[in-house]
Image (tube, rainbow, N blue to C red):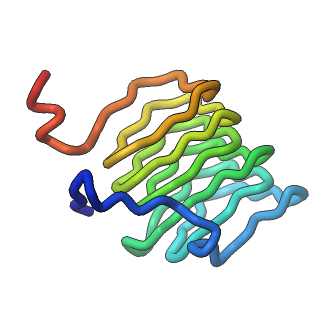
Amino acid sequence: MAQSAFEVRHASDNDVTTVLGRQDRTRGDLHVGGGVRVQGVVRGNIEPVSDQCTVIVSEGGHVQGNVHASRARVDGAVTGALSIDGHLDVSATAVIDGDITYGSMSIESGARVDGHVRCRHSEFNERE
């Protein structure tokens, strides 16, 4: 998904079509066409089935696997790689243990990220 620096689209509550509640646990890959809010625990990868895939990991939610999506917001925990084609919001309460590849990203002070962070846009990578 190509986007310029001026076309940032944040993950929002309006994108959510499915909620995995606080008491819910699932094991296995989750294939998302719309938007999913993870309040419980996903043990498996989250993969897009459309270019509108949005993932929101709520505070208290945990994904134990890789996440690939068009846009995402992490308020909870992700143990695995994040590959976000568009915008990634990382809040102060987020804990990410894995590599991140993103189109654009905002990260709040207090967030914990342990892994390599790399921008998808080649014009940024060519400076290296």
**Which residue is at 35% across, 46% downward?**
104
Asked if residue 27 lies left or right of residue 65, the reply is right
Asked if residue 36 lies left or right of residue 103, the reply is right
Q: Residue furthest front?
A: 6
In the rendering, at what x and y percent does residue 89 appear? 51, 46
Quarter of the rendering occupied by the N terminus: bottom left
Determine whether 47 is above or below 58 in the image.
below
In the rendering, at what x and y percent does residue 29 appear? 59, 59
In the rendering, at what x and y percent does residue 120 appear? 25, 43
Quarter location, residue 101: top left
Determine whether 34 is above or below 46 in the image.
below
Asked if residue 7 lies left or right of residue 50, the reply is left
**Front-most of 125 and 28?**
125
Quarter of the rendering occupied by the C terminus: top left
**Which residue is at 52% across, 64% downward?**
54
Q: So how many labels did they put on this image?
A: 0
**Which residue is at 80% across, 44% downward?**
60
Quarter location, residue 50: bottom left
**Which residue is at 50% across, 76% downward?**
33
**Front-most of 79 and 103?**
103
**Front-most of 126 and 65?**
126
Determine whether 31 is above or below 75 in the image.
below
In the rendering, at what x and y percent does residue 41 appear? 76, 50
Q: Residue furthest right?
A: 23
